[in-house]
Image (cartoon, helix red, strand yellow):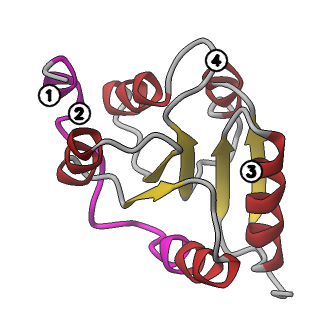
Amino acid sequence: MAASVLAHVLLVDDEETVLRVLMRLCMKQGHTVIACQSVEMALEAMKGPKPFDLIMTDIVLPGQTGLSFLEWLIRHKVQVGVVVMTAYPDHQTVQFAKENGVLDVLVKPFDNMMWLSKKIAKWTSLKHPTKKISGWMPKLREI
């Protein structure tokens, strides 16, 4: 386990099992983690005193969607790396996400925990990722 906190991570998924797995992987690497089961909870967490270094959000969520959360991040010019997760990938959404600054798109369920752990280490090492979410809102209306 890491000796100091490396990154502050926000997880957004309505599946408790997914949150537990991601929390365990992040915390094992020394990151602090806030886990939320809805966009509404995530928006509350965003009001906290410490900014997030990484946000991992599901697309399909109860209430507001992960895409609406991304719209909020754009509108508020939040400088953070974002990873989108989905059990229902479609080529258009995946391509669109990658073209608009999302660090990566994860397809659930997660089968390889070692691979996922390495990906989390990579994403959290980008304290100030060069790829930021940009231009999401105008293109979102085209989907």
Alpha carbon separation for disc pair 2 and 4: 21 Å
Q: Position of residue 48 (x, y in %)?
A: 71, 36
Q: Position of residue 69 (x, y in %)?
A: 47, 27
For the point 65% across and 48% down, which residue is it?
Answer: 10
Label pair 2/4, CB-CB below 8 angstroms: no
Alpha carbon separation for disc pair 3 and 1: 29 Å
Viewer-nearest of discs 2 and 4: 4
Q: Which mark is residue 136?
A: 2
Alpha carbon separation for disc pair 1 and 2: 6 Å
Alpha carbon separation for disc pair 2 and 3: 26 Å
Q: Farthest residue in the top direction?
A: 63
Task: Say which amino acid is labelled 4.
Answer: Pro
Task: Say which amino acid is labelled 1.
Answer: Lys
> Which residue is nearer to you in this view: 112 or 40?
112
Label pair 1/4, CB-CB below 8 angstroms: no
111 left or right of 16 in image: left
Alpha carbon separation for disc pair 4 and 3: 15 Å
Viewer-nearest of discs 1 and 4: 4
Q: Under tag 4, what secondary structure?
A: loop
Residues rendered magenta in the picture: 122-141
The N terminus appears in which quarter of the rendering?
A: bottom right
Marked residue nearer the N-terminal end (4 or 3): 3
Q: Which mark is residue 139?
A: 1
Determine if the magenta segment contains residue 88: no
Q: Which mark is residue 18?
A: 3
Q: Which residue is mark 4?
A: 62
Task: Say which amino acid is labelled 3.
Answer: Val
